[in-house]
Structure formats: C-alpha cells, structure tokens
C-alpha cells in the first residue's frame, strides 16, 4: 500500500517532466545600463522609457534587450515494431508468448462419479461379522 502512493507520485512526476521538456520558453530581459529593469517570460519585457534617446543618432543607446530562448524537443520519436532488428523482434514476440502462456488454466478433469451418492448404511457389517481392525 505504501508503494502504491510512491508509484503514483513517480508516474505523475515523469509525465510532467515529459510535458515540460516539449515546451519552448522565451525569457526577455531589459537592461538599462548595467541594471536589470524588467524580466518577462512568454511576452516582451517593458522598457524603461529611455528608448527615445536611442532615436537620436548623437547618443549611444544605454538600454539593451537580452532574449534567452530555451527550446524544447521538437519531436518525440516512437519506434514501431517494424523498425526494430529481427533478433529484437524475435525476443519480444517470444517473451510475450511465454508470458501469456503462464496464465493459461489447466484443462478441467472429468470426474465420472461426481453426482453419485453412496448407498445408505443399514447394518454395521464389521460388528455383525465381528471383524475388527487392530
């Protein structure tokens, strides 16, 4: 019983891991000088309002945007049975055949006198013949 809960937690954890590994994340950071002003996940980072100075060509822009992209898996590959080598196919098919044959029941034996009722004992023959087992 105690293993049942831990197995369920482990299965849910692995399914969340597979789900999160297929997502792609974008983290945008806006720096004004050397100070981090804004961080945004899945959207654009808000500026500090000093982008107007970047328009003038006389001044060097002090703001910069850094975009970190964390890419997930594009495609999860699932191998079919036909993609496997012949020896692996043979092993898997023989393993499944022997595993399923473990649970086959034995044939029912026929009992011919199952519905036969024995006769009623009217006399105790051992007592009448005075034959006793010692």
Image (cartoon, helix red, strand yellow):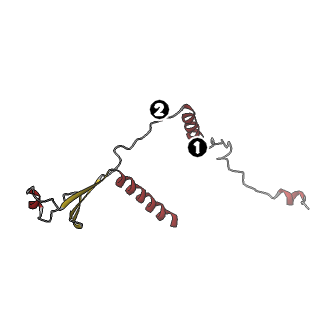
Q: Is residue 123 left or right of residue 8?
A: right
Residue 86's place in the image compared with 120, above or below, is above
Q: How many numbered discs?
A: 2
Q: Is residue 71 left or right of residue 77?
A: left
Give neighbour class at mark 2: few <14, some 14-19, many 20+ (Cα, 10 Å): few
Image position, residue 21 (x, y; %): 36, 52
Q: Which is more toward the observer, 104 or 134?
A: 104
The numbered mark, 2 or 1, whose residue comes first in the sequence reads: 2
Q: How much space separates mark 2 and mark 1, taking CA atoms?
A: 21 Å
**Numbered disc 1: secondary structure:** helix
Circle 1 is placed at which residue position? Answer: 99
Residue 1 visible in the snapshot: no
Q: Is residue 113 left or right of residue 6?
A: right
Q: Which is more toward the observer, 134 or 122?
A: 134
Residue 93's place in the image compared with 45, above or below, is above
**Numbered disc 2: secondary structure:** helix
Residue at image x 68%, y 50%? 117
Circle 2 is placed at which residue position? Answer: 82
Image position, residue 23 (x, y; %): 31, 52
Q: Nearer the viewer, mark 2 or mark 1?
A: 2
Image position, residue 49 (x, y; %): 11, 65
């Amino acid at each position: 019983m105690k293993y049942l809960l831990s197995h369920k937690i482990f299965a849910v954890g692995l399914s969340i891991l597979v789900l999160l590994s297929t997502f792609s994340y974008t983290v945008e950071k806006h720096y004004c000088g050397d100070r981090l002003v804004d961080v945004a996940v899945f959207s654009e980072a808000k500026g500090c309002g000093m982008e107007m100075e970047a328009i003038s060509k006389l001044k060097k822009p002090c703001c910069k945007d850094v975009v970190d992209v964390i890419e997930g898996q594009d495609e999860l590959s699932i191998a079919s049975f036909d993609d496997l080598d012949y020896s692996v196919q043979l092993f898997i098919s023989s393993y499944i055949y022997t595993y399923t044959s473990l649970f086959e029941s034995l044939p029912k034996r026929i009992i011919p006198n199952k519905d036969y009722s024995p006769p009623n004992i009217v006399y105790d023959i051992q007592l009448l013949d005075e034959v006793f087992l010692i």
